[in-house]
Amino acid sequence: MSKYVLTVTCPSTRGIVAAIANYMADSGCNITDSAQFDDLETGQFFMRVSFTSQTGATLQQLRDGFAAAAEKFDMNFDFHVDGAKTKVVIMVSRFGHCLNDLLYRARIGSLPIDIVAVISNHMDYQKVVVNADIPYYCIKVTKENKPQAEAQIMQVVEETGAELIVLARYMQILSDALCKKMSGKIINIHHSFLPSFKGANPYKQAFERGVKLIGATSHYVTADLDEGPIIEQDIIRVTHAQSAEDYVSLGRDVEAQVFARAIHAHAQHRVFMNGNKTIVFPASPGSYASERMG
């Protein structure tokens, strides 16, 4: 049997769930998992349905068959092959902990992604990436060549068929034009429990303020620096006896875990944009992401 995922966003009204269930039943499909959320503030409805097709229907057949129900409720919808790997381009600068973590998770199959390229503005991780049989592109970025550099980046994305860009501590600010072009398709890891400490050195700020908790935030990238819709966050406790360097070391572990969970949720089509926020449905029972990533 073929396994699929249906994602739906539409204005909230009566009859949506019934229409989806009826379509599934009439099309020879069996629902295996379902999650929904009705946002009373925005008036939007969100739903994710995992199902099997006993007829062997293709994605296009499912989309065509569902079009009438979708039109009636003004749905923004899509069907996805359940378990299909998302093609990802990783961008990194000189901090490699998130890059190395993603390479490892992808290799052992704990993340449903296919890393099709790594782009950096330095050569530091070329050997690591090439040894993993992944193409490595060094694209230098300066104020003078930024438009040309971003054109090269987009060329890599388009030629590899990448569906998602992940900024694994890539320390260059993307232009507004690139952010808009790839809206909802760029995920960043920020080494701070936003919105408390922003900028390049949040751990130093946290140390100077004597905080008791530090953390990390993974979010979609928008033109507003470090203010895109948040997907995942986590924290770790620290004490007065630890140094700023200790904060950095502990923070790297949190960053890697938060980043991986955010990418996993996106790749499984569990994240829905809801204005400046996101709706993130939990992973299905028994799946890898339903447990804490270590």
Image (tube, helix red, strand yellow):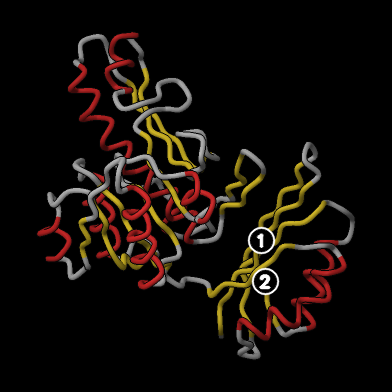
Q: CA distance from mark 2 to mark 1?
A: 7 Å
**Residue hosting label 2:** 31
Taking 289 as reference, is 156 left or right?
Answer: left
Q: Nearer the viewer, residue 193 or 91?
A: 91
Taking 181 as reference, is 116 left or right?
Answer: left
What is the quadrant of residue 154 in the picture? bottom left
Residue 235: image location, x then y, percent? 39, 29
Vertical comparison of 182 with 217: above or below: below
Dot 1 falls on a residue whose secondary structure is: strand
Residue 138: image location, x then y, percent? 20, 56
**Residue hosting label 1:** 34
Q: Residue at x 55, y 50 (%)?
A: 282
Q: Residue at x 63, y 64 (%)?
A: 33
Residue 204: image location, x then y, percent? 27, 17
The outermost residue toward the front is: 144
At label 2, the amino acid type is: Ile
Q: Are marks 2 and 1 in contact (CB under 8 Å)?
A: yes
Q: Residue at x 28, y 31 (%)?
A: 251
Residue 196: image location, x then y, percent? 45, 20
What is the quadrant of residue 153 in the picture? bottom left
